[in-house]
Image (spheres, rainbow, N blue to C red):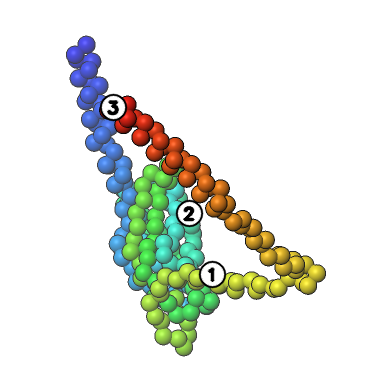
Amino acid sequence: MKRFIAVLAAVAMLLLLASPVLAASLGISPSHVELEVPADSSTTADFKVHYFSGDLQVSLVDIPLEVEPETLHIEPSSEPVDIELTIYGDESLGSRIYDGYIRFLGMSGETVAVAVKVKATVTNLVEGETPVPATPEEPQPPPEEAPPEETPPAPSEQEPPAPPAPQAETEGFPIIPVAVIAAVTAIVITTVVVRARRRRY
C-alpha cells in the first residue's frame, strides 16, 4: 500500500513539473518589431516560431489595423518555422504611431494552450502627414439636457383663489359668576377654620 501511494505521489510530481514545460512550448522571435505601414497599402513582418506545432492564431492588441493570416498551421519541426504576417494600413486613422502587441495563441483543439505577445510599434503612415503618437480616445460627456420650461396653466385651468379662512369667534370670559363663586368659597373656608379653633379651646 505504501509503495502504491509513493508511485501516485511520483506521478503527481511529474505532472506538476510537466505543466511549465507545456506552458513554455511556444517561442516567437524577434521579441520586438517596429513597422511602418502605408495607410493606403500594407507591409509584411517576418517571425520565427519555436517549439510549437499545431494551429496558431494571430491578432493585434491596441493596434486598430488588420492582420493576415489570422490562423496559421505549424507543422512539427526540429528547426524554427518561418512565418510571414501582412498588416494593412487605414487612411481613416490618419498618421498615427501605435504602441501595442502582436498576440500569438497556440491552440489545442478549441482551447488556448499557450500565448505569447510580441511588443510592436506600428506607424500608420498617411502621405504628407507627420505621424503623431496615438492617444486613447476620451469618452465624450453626454450633452446636457435643457430643463423643461414651465408654462403657466391656461386661464380655464387656474384654480379660483381660496376664500380667506374664517376667524375663530372668541367669547368674553364670564368674570362676575367666577367672582361670586370665589367669595362664597372664601367664606366657607373661613367659617370652617373658625369653628375648628373654637373646638380646640
Q: Mark 1: which amino acid?
A: Pro
Badge 2 crowding class, 10 Å Cα cut-off, few under 14, some 14 to 19, many 20 or more, is: some
The secondary structure type at the circle numbered 3 is helix
Is 106 left, or right, of 172 in this rendering? left
The front one of 199 and 174 is 199
Q: CA distance from mark 1 to mark 3?
A: 100 Å
Q: Quadrant of the N terminus?
A: top left
Reply above or below: 6 against 79: above
Reply above or below: 178 against 137: above
- Give the residue number, with chain letter if any, for mark 3: 200
* Res 97 quadrant in image: bottom left
State the residue at coordinates (44%, 48%): 55
Is 77 left, or right, of 16 in this rendering? right
State the residue at coordinates (50%, 70%): 141
State the residue at coordinates (31%, 60%): 29
Q: Mark 2: which amino acid?
A: Thr
Q: Position of residue 75 (x, y in %)?
A: 41, 48
